Image (cartoon, rainbow, N blue to C red):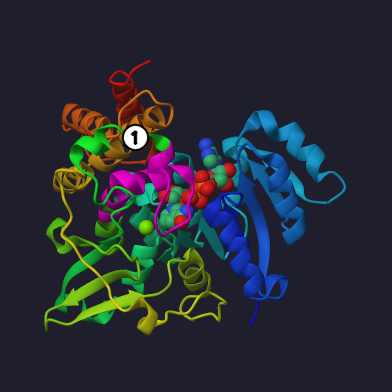
Amino acid sequence: MSTRRIAIFGATGSIGLNTLDVIEQLGGRDSFELTAVTGNANVEALAKKAIDHGARMAVTADETRYKALKEALSGSGITPAAGTSGLSEAARMDNDMVMAAIVGTAGLKPTLEAAKAGADIALANKECLVSAGPLFMEAIAAGGGTMVPVDSEHSAVFQVFEENQRRALERVIITASGGPFRTRSLEEMRHVDAATARAHPNWSMGLKISIDSASMFNKALEMIEAMHLFALKPEQVEVIVHPQSIIHSMVGYADGSVLAQLGAPDMRTAIGYALSYPNRPALSVERLDFARLARLDFEAPDEIRFPALRLARVAMARGGLQGAVLNGAKEVALEAFIEGRCGFLEMAEITEAVMDSLSHLPAAVDIDDIYAADAEARLRAAGLVRA
Ligand code: NAD
Ligand code: MG
């Protein structure tokens, strides 16, 4: 097999590090040529990964860290770069594939550029589709690459989605673990703090997505992500709580059949699939032992305790820039919650108020419209949290 040229956006994060691990499992430099790795504040970790894995370029998104990155890379022959222009440069390299694993809206622009340049996109950064779904789907089509989801639920759907049976497709059923507060009362949830909220029962992930899992804002984002990725009507997107996180998601067809993808909760399976598609790689991840599992449980999601799910429906029905607004407002509320300036349930209240106040925005024409809506949503949300 020839080597594939790959850039990893967000190489120092949870998904980025797992991606480097999977690349090693898949043959390292014999299978992949690392064009670029990007990170943010921690330039020492970024430089080390760039050197260890033989990247051609390393980019810190934080311009003030350029000198530190340059020093950390000195003598390695690896090109340092910084800021939005550095990320753009990485996006325009001769990439066969880009792992889009930056957290948040900072990932939108470079990922869109890479898609337009024709790279295949392994998409972890769900905010891309939540905030700018139509723009991304157009960019992928225009660039001629393939978008393979890395989010475990969407990877599962992608794996059992029979594209040639689209007319028989009825529904996509996204599973949710229910997070650490699945069985808590509304009153208890009012008082939880970030330390409790970040402890996810099944998955080990970055800080923000872990707390988003506790509030089920992560599932809300995933509903919107699925709608765009698989060109679904809002009512075709269902959510079911499945506490064991063994079934990663399902697709229901017109003959009553439901196809599911199952596996241990380990992001490396979805990452390996995205990196190897349409082939299945050999991975040393845990195998399921069904006798030991014994049972799989399901519960209807509770939109009263988890209002984020209802907000996703509102955003999907309204369309236009509501996804960008939901995400931008949620990010500010989430940061406020992490810093103790906003209660757990207030995150949804703030997000809903901002969505209602910006429900009139027209659909986005380009990425600047997305960033403008995102900025306005953040400004309004900031006005609603404690200073
Ligand atoms: P993380 O916080 O562990 O890592 C984020 C990465 O983005 C780091 O490399 C960081 O340096 C970089 N980054 C942070 N701020 C940046 C900025 N302003 N500009 C440029 N780069 C910046 O996050 P993660 O858990 O790896 O998640 C990455 C993305 O993948 C998120 O969108 C998340 O929702 C999605 N995702 C993650 C998981 C998971 O298991 N961790 C699962 C599904 C989807
Ligand atoms: Mg997920």
Q: Is residue 282 magenta?
A: no
Q: Is residue 214 in view from this perspective?
A: yes
| Residue at image coords 34%, 30% | 333
**In the displayed structure image, the side of residue 1 where residue 109 appears, left or right:** left
Around disc 1, counting alpha carbons within 10 Å, would you say few (fewer than 14), some (14 to 19), or many (20 or more)? many
Q: Can you give x and y, in whole percent of width and height, for residue 44 in the image?
A: 73, 42
| Residue at image coords 28%, 20% | 384
| Residue at image coords 70%, 46% | 45
* Residue range (magenta): 195-223
In this view, the residue farthest toward the right is 75
The kind of residue on which mark 1 rests is: Gly
Q: Can you give x and y, in whole percent of width and height, for residue 176 in the image?
A: 28, 59
Magenta span: predominant SS is: helix
Read off the residue under disc 1: 328
Q: Is residue 111 in view from this perspective?
A: no
Disc 1 secondary structure class: helix
Viewer-side residue, 244 vs 113: 244
Quarter holding the C terminus is top left
Quarter holding the N terminus is bottom right
169 shown above or below 51? below
Q: Is residue 210 magenta?
A: yes
Q: Can you give x and y, in whole percent of width and height, for residue 209 in the image?
A: 41, 47
45 shown above or below 360? below
Viewer-side residue, 62 vs 271: 271
Q: Can you tell which quarter of the image residue 26 is in?
A: bottom right
**In the displayed structure image, the side of residue 236 where residue 368 appears, left or right:** right
**In the displayed structure image, the side of residue 332 where residue 66 appears, left or right:** right
Viewer-side residue, 63 vs 126: 126
Q: Can you tell which quarter of the image residue 265 is in?
A: bottom left
346 shown above or below 264? above
Q: Can you give x and y, in whole percent of width and height, for residue 188 in the image?
A: 24, 37
16 shown above or below 252? above
